[in-house]
Image (tube, grey):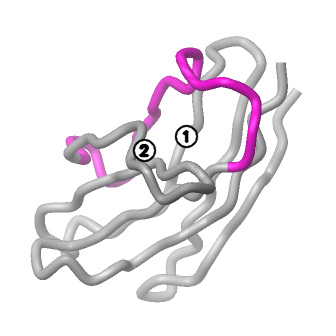
């Protein structure tokens, strides 16, 4: 089962986040290699960063959310100038 939980157009490429039951992770697809170095953050509703990673594969990047408790989170991707290039809300349910 795959749930589509957000998408946005970037450079005529659709960036999508989705969660799969098999890996309990969120996957981002469609980032452009031309964006430069990208940083991914997952932020809780209180504004605390709970996951922070450098994106190593801009075409398809998965992050584990197994350590997060149930709740609402914001997934943000920002470039080296700290400009947010993608943002999506996810809901973690067990």
Q: Residue at horizontal 59%, vertical 37%?
A: 26
Q: Which label is found at residue 27?
A: 1
Check the image and report above or below for 11 versus 36: below
Position in image of residue 23 (x %, y %): 62, 14
Q: Residue at x 45, y 32 (%)?
A: 63
- State left or right for residue 5 relative to residue 85: right
Q: Which residue is mark 2?
A: 60
Depth check, mark 2 against mark 1: the one in front is: 1
Q: What is the magenta range?
A: 55-72
Element type where label 1 sits in the image: strand
Q: Position of residue 92 (x, y in %)?
A: 75, 34
In x, y percent, where is residue 14? 58, 73
Establish if 78 lies above or below 38. Answer: below
**Residue 35's quadrant in the figure?**
bottom left
Check if residue 68 falls in the magenta segment: yes
In percent of the image, x 12 and y 62: which residue is there? 37
Looking at the image, which is closer to me, 43 or 29?
43
10 Å crowding of disc 2: few (<14), some (14-19), many (20+): some
In the rendered view, does 24 fall on the left or right side of 53? right
On the rendered image, what quadrant is the N terminus found in?
Answer: top right
Compute the Cα span from label 2 to label 1.
Answer: 7 Å
Which percent across, then down, holds residue 34?
Answer: 19, 75
């Amino acid at each position: 089962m795959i749930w589509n939980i957000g998408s946005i157009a970037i450079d005529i490429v659709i960036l999508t986040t989705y969660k799969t039951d098999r890996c309990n992770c969120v996957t981002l697809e469609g980032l452009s290699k031309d964006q430069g170095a990208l940083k991914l953050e997952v932020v809780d509703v209180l504004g605390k960063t709970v996951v922070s990673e450098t994106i190593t594969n801009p075409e398809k990047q998965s992050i584990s959310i197994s350590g997060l408790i149930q709740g609402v989170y914001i997934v943000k991707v920002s470039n080296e100038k700290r400009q947010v290039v993608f943002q999506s809300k996810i809901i973690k349910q067990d």
